[in-house]
Amino acid sequence: MSTAEIKLKLFREIDKLDQSKLEQVYGLLFNFLNKENDTEEWNSLSQMQQSGLLEAIEELDSSEGIDHQSIMDKFRKKYA
C-alpha cells in the first residue's frame, strides 16, 4: 500500500468515528506523535512506583498475576 493510500484509508476510517472515539484516537495519535523519549515517563516515576511496576511485570511474566477480565468480572458481580 502506498503512502497516499494509507493516508486516505486512515482519513476515511477517522471520518466515520463518533465524537467519543474520535477524541480517543486524537489522544492516542497526539501522544504518539509528541512522545520525545520512551523513558521520559518512566524516569518521572518515583523509585517506589518503578519497583512496583517491575514487580507486577515479573508476576505477570511468571503467570502469577490475575488477568484484567477476571478482575472486572469479580467486581461486576459484586457491585451489580
Image (spheres, helix red, strand yellow):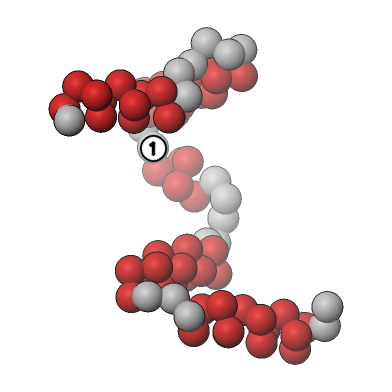
| Residue 79: quadrant of the picture | top left
Residue displayed at 41% across by 23% down:
70
| Residue 44: quadrant of the picture | top left
* Few, some or many residues within 10 Å of mark 1 (<14, 14–19, 20+): few
Q: Is 9 positioned to the left or the right of 26 in the image?
A: right
Q: Amino acid at mark 1?
A: Leu
Along the line of sight, which residue is nearer the eye, 75 or 80?
80
Q: Residue furthest left?
A: 79
Along the line of sight, which residue is nearer the eye, 70 or 27?
70
Residue displayed at 72% across by 80% down:
6
The quarter of the rendered structure image containing the N terminus is bottom right
Q: Position of residue 13 (x, y in %)?
A: 56, 78
Query: Which residue is label 1 attached to?
Result: 45
| Residue 57: quadrant of the picture | top right
Dot 1 lies on which element? loop
Q: Does residue 5 show up?
A: yes
The quarter of the rendered structure image containing the C terminus is top left
